[in-house]
Image: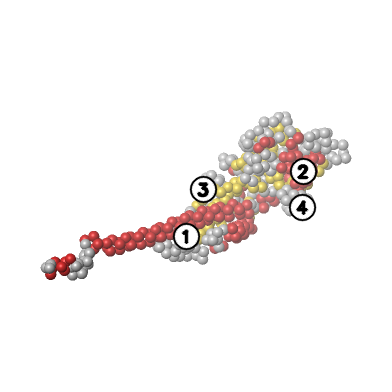
Amino acid sequence: MLPRSTKRSTDASPGRTACGAPVRSGRGWRRPRRKGFTAVLFTMIVVVGIVAMALVLNWVYLLMVSQRTTQTTDVLALGAAQQLLDENILLDMTPTALSQSAAEAAATSEVDDLRIDNNAAAGRGNELEAADVTVTPGYVNNVNDSEPFATSPYYTLTTHALAAMNTDQAYNALRVEVLRSPTGSNPVRMLVRGFGAPSDGVKMSSVAIAALDNRVVGFRPTSAVASPVAPLAIDTTAWHSTRVSDADDSFNGNLRYELDVMLDRSSGGGSPNSALVNVDDSAVTVDLSVIDDQIRDGIFPGDLSGTTLGPASMGSPLSLAADASSPTAADATSTDDIVMEFNTIAVSDDPRRIFPIYSMVAGGFATVTGFIAADVLEAENTGTGMGYDELRVRIEPAFIVHFTAETDQSLPDDEVNPYIYKLRLIRHETP
């Protein structure tokens, strides 16, 4: 028989003491602590990840809203700036103090219409309220300089010597500011709230200034967009002096003085104040075969010797081949063909064309010193039944804003153009 104490020890179960208590090894004793630490660490990582994701989402969202706000501000300014063009300039008025309150109201109204259109297309969170937008008309003398944006009243002087606009300081620029304030009715709310993000939203602002640049010296058409230049150049004295002194407004009575642009009779002996020109400044004769197409469609790069028609100014004129005679039925383009094209333009939705102006025609060349814009009212061959051809085209002043216009900021102030403009986004500001 075994001793009593020995028997008890042999009856003990594995992992237990002889008295039945569990054996607590050093390794097994620490395992619950490690499991708890891992759970806490995992929870912290998940929380930090969620917060980081929220911050990233908010940052990306705010960046998208900021870009959209900037784009919208640009569109509002560019889309409404043309409303500032002062119709009084087209009326050949004498110097007098004028208010552009009507133009300012029109620009403000156009901005609001564009804002509403933008809201219809904007994604959620990008809508603008009327109170978010501030419209300020003003004047900049040079789109490249850093002079302050002026908003003072102006005096208009429309003598049509092309010298007026410098002293006029008519509104030619529109400043649009978009400001969504956290304390306003339309703040920019965070995409993910909490996690330290401002509960009342963030400030979002953008400023754009669109300017009507009228230091025009030429045109650069593209293969897709023609410049609306008619190859019919007008004597500058006839336009700026004779037209104003004659004060003829008989065609439509809108107070814009009209001019009958005349070519010489095909037989000679007329009183021309214009000439057909070849817009290719390398040519030495007028190509009548393309005249009707250019009147109808404008000029394209293929019509030019280079990429640009111009520059042409009083200080640096452009020489173009010219012919002051009315073409006959035997020519590639007849006077009747030209009459038909101009009359088609006159009854179209947009009867405007740009015409070169010249200081003289001599030796088969016109000395072009600039350009004017006009509505085409009517055209006729006044020599019909008389045994000769004689072109007459009646026009009156108009505005044209065209992106193919080429401008030169070094152009003297007395040569800025009252009729033709290039729209520019000239500067962004931080409110």
Above/below status of 216 relative to 48 = above
Point out residue 241 in the picture as x, y percentages from the top left corner. 71, 43
**Residue at 49% across / 63% down in the picture?**
187
Q: Tell me the kind of residue under disc 3.
A: Glu
Mark yes or no: residue 427 visible.
yes
Q: Determine crowd level at label 1: few under 14, some 14-19, many 20+ residues with C-alpha closer than 10 A.
A: some
Q: How far apart are labels 1 and 3 at the CA level?
A: 28 Å
Residue for badge 2: 341
Residue for badge 4: 252
Q: How far apart are labels 1 and 2 at the CA level?
A: 55 Å
Circle 2 — which element? Answer: helix
Point out residue 165 in the picture as x, y percentages from the top left corner. 61, 47
Q: How far apart are labels 3 and 4 at the CA level?
A: 41 Å
Judge left or right: residue 156 versus residue 257. Answer: left
Above/below status of 2 relative to 223 = below
Residue for badge 1: 203
